[in-house]
Amino acid sequence: MPAAAPDALFDLAVNRAHAALRGLRPADPAPALAEWHARTRFARRVPLAAVVAALALKPDDRGEWHWAGGPGGGWVTGKAPFP
């Protein structure tokens, strides 16, 4: 597996989790995220706690944002390069 694959997989997991919550906007997203995580291919390779931690760092700005840079990355303005 190429060295960039884990970062790309992490980015994809965070961005997909963010998209899954976008329509819901629950007061407590933990149950919805746990259910989403259990149904995805990320469950074994990207820990739910890491996804939740990344989501908690998202800026409050309502603009378009995506996560980039793997576990050590951050939120970047604009649309994600892949869905």
Image: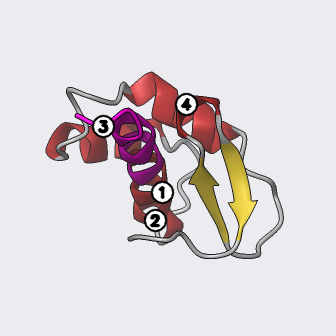
Neighbours of disc 2 within 10 Å: few (<14), some (14-19), many (20+): few
* Colour style of the rendered protein structure: secondary structure
Quadrant of the drawing holding the C terminus: bottom left
Residue type pointed to by label 2: Ala
- Kindly identify which numbered label has been placed on residue 15: 1
The secondary structure type at the circle numbered 1 is: helix
> Of discs 2 and 1, which sits in the foreground?
1
Q: Single out the mark in the foreground, 4 or 3.
A: 3
Mark closest to the chain's N terminus, 1 or 3: 3
Task: Report whether 13 appears left or right of 62.
Answer: left
- For marks 4 and 3 on the same chain, the one whose residue lies earlier in the sequence: 3
The crowding category of the residue bearing disc 1, from other C-alpha atoms within 10 Å (few below 14, some 14 to 19, many at least 20), is many
Task: Tell me which amino acid carries mark 3.
Answer: Pro
Q: Which residue is mark 3?
A: 2
Of labels 1 and 4, earlier in sequence is 1
* Residue that numbered label 4 is attached to: 71
**Image quadrant of residue 77?**
bottom right
Three-letter residue code for mark 4: Pro
Image: 78 above or below 46 = below
Q: Which numbered disc, 4 or 2, marks the residue that appears first in the sequence?
A: 2
Please state the horizontal and vertical placement of residue 64, each as a whole percent of the image: 68, 75
Q: Residue at x 59, y 43 (%)?
A: 69
Q: Which residues are magenta?
A: 1-12
In front: 38, or 11?
A: 11
Q: Which residue is mark 2?
A: 19
Most common secondary structure along the magenta stretch = helix
Q: Position of residue 7 (x, y in %)?
A: 45, 38
53 or 30: which is nearer to us?
53
* Residue 1 location, quadrant: top left
Residue 76, x across and y down, in percent: 72, 59
Label 3: element kind: loop
